[in-house]
Image: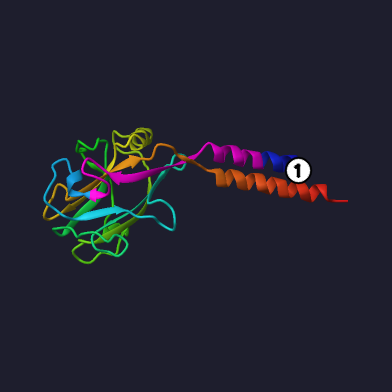
Amino acid sequence: MKALFSGLLCVSVVASQSAIWEFDLGGKGGPGLLAANEVQPNSSIATGKELSYYEVPGIVYDDVAKTLEFHAGWGTHETVNGAQLTGHYISSALYGPATMHENAARPLYSFDPSNGLMTGSDHSGRSALVHARVQLVELEGYSIAQQQADLLASRWYFNVLSTAFESGEIRGQLMSVPEPRQYALASGAALLAFAAVRRKFKNRP
């Protein structure tokens, strides 16, 4: 019983130390994926946004597992209900580090049909969805710790490139929601399990 209590307490402590960070897409031109959010705004009327996924916010980061859940889309797909890209899709990726007024030197994590992370797209890619779980990895000259710090400081952005605007047609900065959500569910589950076991032993003759 003592060992079981220690194990449950351990789970509770570990869970309480982890947090989920939420993000909204936005920028200097407004919320969502917009041409006006590009550093050099263009004339595209294409739009996109983050998408909730099974009632979970569209973009969330686990600071213990170092994973970023990223769900977004653009164009006329029914879950987006926006405007299509002007040109054919070239690529889409997370970029950083950069503020909303800067361009990053390189893409960090790419989302394309070839890696199975894009759905709901026709051959042109003018309308598409991205559903991805990004596991942060060490990148050349950019450690996981640095990536996390920049991500939480809203210094990453998502950019969609097309044949009409090859440096980026629509963009959205990952804007960190101020307060992370604690893993209260996991912690609560551990406490409930402990209470149930305690009652079981207490009621034994």
- Among all residues in the image, which is located at the extreme right? 205
How many residues crowd around disc 1 within 10 Å: few (fewer than 14), some, or many (20 or more)? few
Its colouring scheme is rainbow
What is the tally of numbered marks visible in this picture?
A: 1
As drawn, 138 above or below 199: above
Q: Residue 44: in sight, yes or no?
A: yes
* Percent position of residue 60, x then y: 40, 46
Residue 171 or residue 145, whichever sits in front: 171
Q: Residue at x 35, y 33 (%)?
A: 146
- In the rendered image, which quarter is residue 173 located in? top left
Q: Residue at x 57, y 46 (%)?
A: 186
Query: In the visual, does 52 lie left or right of 198?
Result: left
As drawn, 142 above or below 1: above
Q: Dividing the image into 4 quarters, which one contains the N terminus?
A: top right
Residue 14 falls within the magenta-colored stretch: yes
- In the rendered image, which quarter is residue 4 located in? top right
* Percent position of residue 7, x then y: 66, 41
- The amino acid marked with disc number 1 is Met
Q: Secondary structure at mark 1?
A: loop
The part of the chain drawn in magenta is 8-33
